[in-house]
Amino acid sequence: MKKFIQLILISLVIIVATQMIGCAKEEVNRNAAKRDIRAVWISTVFNLDWPSTKGDINAQKEEFIKILDDVSSLGFNTVIVQVRPKGDALYQSKINPWSEVLTGIQGQDPGYDPLEFMIKEAHQRNLEIHAWLNPYRVTSLPAENDQLAPNNFAVQHPQWVIEYDNKLYYNPGIPEVRHYIVDTVKEIVENYDIDGIHFDDYFYPKKNIDDKIAYEQYGEGKSLEAFRIDSVNQLVAEVSQAIKQIKPEVKFGISPAGIWKNKSNDETGSDTEGYESYYEIFCDTRTWIQNEWIDYVVPQVYWTTDNKNSNYVTVVEWWNNEVAGKKTQLYIGEGIYKDEIVAELAEQIKVNEKYDNVKGSVYFTYSDISNNRNGVRETLKELYRLPAIPYSMPWLNDKKPKPVEVAINDNGTSKAITIFNNYQDAKYYLIYRFNQGEKMDLTNPAKIIAKVRNNEGEYEEYVDNKDGDFYYAITALNRNHIESNPTVKLKK
């Protein structure tokens, strides 16, 4: 099938060569650079970000489209959507009930498949979309405990549930719970064209829970702490393995709390004094990274650069060193729900850019962007004024797409570029424009004039006569964002 991209030009465009000029390396400094992860969390628990209306299909679809259009206009390239907030589903599932955030009643069919719809709309806008799951939470309010659907796993297997602070959680120490969560992930990966699976920071609800029965049955002589750590680690390892067996190109990422351990408790921890995810919720991120079970990690560094106990710079530097040499990319979670974070957001992004292993940022949460908390929209527009594409992950797929073959059609007042060989590994194309005589620099995002989805409709560029002479370079990129050599079209 042919790919038509119509370019309205001012004079003849001729084919000169298919060659590689100014071959690009992925940048370390992402200030105005082409490679950068720009993601936002879209929360559905409590209907925080979406949907604002329950039971109205058209309203929900229109609202989500507006969200995607908004984040696209602000320069984002990834959305992380909460599709399993409380042991439920915003997708067609055989093992999880429909989420009450859609209709107001858990288990009630919303009349459409939200995840299928969201994936289609996100991909049309060249946005990556990751399915965000809360692995263990069953209820977020005590009042929800007796409002669960009959087919809820917690209703069918109450012995696998623990209660903390009058809310329900699956017990991480029970193997059947782990198998159920792995099956939940497998169902999504098998049935949907998702780009990633994402877990948040909810593992064990707290260390002072009553899991004595599970510990006595499955502890195998370990200390209680070691048993709990091992229970979570087994889940992460098994989820990672399941994803790669089904679709190796699907990414797996986790967003832990910002501190693994404080230096005061472990000399290899960060020089901080704050909530330690290792000891409080048994979240051993270091093991996940060392074993390369996760493709990316997003620590929630929700502090300012002058925080005395948990300094932003100190924490970012620690995580930068933690992922060094590992097949795990590092993105920083930015807590823009806090006015003080927004006030210094530009400064925090500059901090990130100083570290080789920081590959971008993820923002919590979309509603704070939509509501323009403390002027965050203006800051983001300035930070992301140039386009960017995500970093590739060579360990998932290191195959470079073939260069495109291009022909020119003269339509009288315009020229149409036809791209042949729509290879299956080409998910989208980048079109660059350079001035005549200018060296081709494919690392410069200012030269990208279009990002066009494979099998999409026409693209038109209107060129003013004052633009002078220029040439184009067109590349193909696969779903892992590995870029082909360019095909060059020179305008005399």
Image (tube, rainbow, N blue to C red):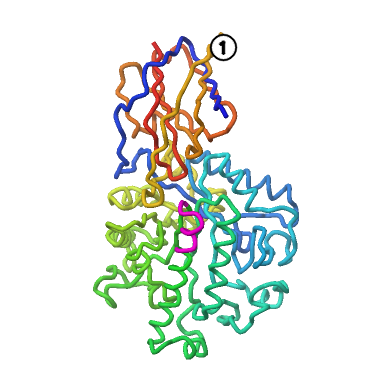
Residue 193 percent location from the top left of the image: 56, 50
Q: Which residues are magenta?
A: 241-249
Q: Is residue 140 above or below residue 34?
A: below
Please tell me which residue is depicted at 39% across the width and 65% down the height of the picture.
Answer: 258
Q: Is residue 327 above or below residue 24?
A: below
Quick check: can you spot residue 71? Answer: yes
* In front of the other: 428 or 373: 428
Helix, strand or loop status at disc 1: loop
Q: Is residue 282 magenta?
A: no
Residue 421 percent location from the top left of the image: 49, 29
Q: Is residue 381 above or below residue 416?
A: below
> Which amino acid does the dot numbered 1 rest on?
Asn
User: Would you call the spot at circle 1 few (<14 residues within 10 Å), some (14-19), or many (20 or more)?
Assistant: few
Q: Is residue 441 left or right of residue 257?
A: left
**Magenta region, mostly helix, strand or loop?**
helix
Please tell me which residue is depicted at 55% across the width and 62% down the height of the picture.
Answer: 186
Please tell me which residue is depicted at 73% across the width and 57% down the height of the picture.
Answer: 110
Residue 319 percent location from the top left of the image: 32, 61
For disc 1, the marked residue is: 411
Residue 224 percent location from the top left of the image: 41, 86
Viewport quadrant of the N terminus: top right
Q: In the image as oriented, which residue stretches furthest toward the left? A: 267
